[in-house]
Image (tube, helix red, strand yellow):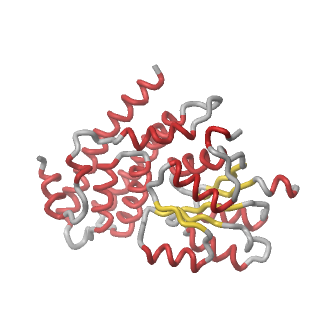
């Protein structure tokens, strides 16, 4: 378990089960939206993956900037936004970490916030790999 | 600007998150309705200033510039907009936020994350007679 994960566990009052899962993405959540797909359109799941992988790095940069500048308002806004899209398409570990960060005060506990923000980057990288693999599988 | 028939088929969707916008837009389009999108509350407000031809509106609670509740409050003070049913979508499941949404004039509240069935049911509550996904045009 990494320092970030340990810090997260020690400070988490929330359900940490998604974080302990081996998979960063719960594909069943994402694939549930297949039923909204119509035959004439491009693959909705691929579109959702592309939109997420395009938008999430912008939010992560905002989170890093907020942590570096102790900007509690920006941290709350960026984590809230990333939490919403992540939980909706099954990127549950990222969503869970965002939920924790959203509740933290970067001025009161800057080192903890920094450690958890690093964990967020790590978990997002894992989720990106899984989403990219799913994307390639669907396009091949 | 729009005929009654066109107006009765259009839904305004405002969300700054492209993933959520795509999910909501797709769910609405599957019911046979036409979606007009805005990327934040301010853009939604600008659209509503000159265009009241919507069957319903769907707003994210937390948007930059102008929040969903602010847009609702504006709509409820404008005679030409006050009858349009509104759904609020929020990542917060706080009962107080839900109560605030209804107090401001929201018709329906959908917490994130949602399943296809949940958004379909909430849309049905909002606009009535929504076709099942597989049978939609």
Residue A128: quarter of image: top left
Query: Is A22 left, or right, of B132 in this rendering?
Result: left
At x 56%, y 46%, the residue is B22
The N terminus of chain B sits in image quarter: bottom right
A120 is higher (above) or lower (below) than B83: above
A36 is higher (above) or lower (below) than B96: above
At x 47%, y 62%, the residue is B111
A79 and A95: which is toward the camera: A95
B122 and A135: which is toward the camera: B122
At x 49%, y 36%, the residue is A45
Coordinates of residue A44 in the picture (x, y in percent): 54, 36
Coordinates of residue A53 in the picture (x, y in percent): 42, 40
Taking the view exactly as shown, the residue that stands out farthest to the top is A140
Coordinates of residue B91 in the picture (x, y in percent): 44, 62
Q: Is residue B64 visible?
A: no
The C terminus of chain B sits in image quarter: top right
Coordinates of residue B63 in the picture (x, y in percent): 52, 63
């Amino acid at each position: 378990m990494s320092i970030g994960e340990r810090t997260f566990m020690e400070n988490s009052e929330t359900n940490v089960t998604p974080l302990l899962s081996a998979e960063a993405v719960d594909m069943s959540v994402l694939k549930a939206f297949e039923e909204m797909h119509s035959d004439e359109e491009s693959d909705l799941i691929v579109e959702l993956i592309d939109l997420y992988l395009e938008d999430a790095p912008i939010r992560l940069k905002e989170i890093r900037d907020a942590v570096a500048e102790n900007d509690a308002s920006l941290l709350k806004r960026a984590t809230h936004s990333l939490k919403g899209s992540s939980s909706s398409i099954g990127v549950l570990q990222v969503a869970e970490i965002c939920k924790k960060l959203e509740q933290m005060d970067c001025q009161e506990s800057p080192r903890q916030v920094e450690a958890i923000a690093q964990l967020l980057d790590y978990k997002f990288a894992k989720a990106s790999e899984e989403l990219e693999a799913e994307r390639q599988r669907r396009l091949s | 600007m729009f005929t009654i028939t066109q107006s009765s088929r259009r839904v305004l969707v405002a969300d700054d998150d492209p993933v959520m916008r795509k999910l909501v837009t797709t769910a609405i389009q599957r019911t046979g309705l036409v979606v007009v999108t805005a990327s934040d509350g301010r853009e939604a407000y600008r659209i509503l200033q000159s265009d009241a031809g919507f069957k319903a509106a769907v707003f994210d609670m937390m948007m930059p510039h102008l929040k969903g509740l602010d847009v609702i409050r504006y709509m409820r003070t404008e005679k030409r907009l006050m009858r349009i049913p509104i759904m609020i979508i929020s990542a917060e499941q706080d009962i107080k936020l839900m109560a605030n949404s209804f107090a401001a004039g929201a018709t329906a509240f959908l917490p994130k994350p949602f399943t296809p069935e949940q958004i379909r049911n909430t849309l049905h509550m909002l606009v009535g007679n929504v076709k099942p996904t597989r049978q939609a045009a």
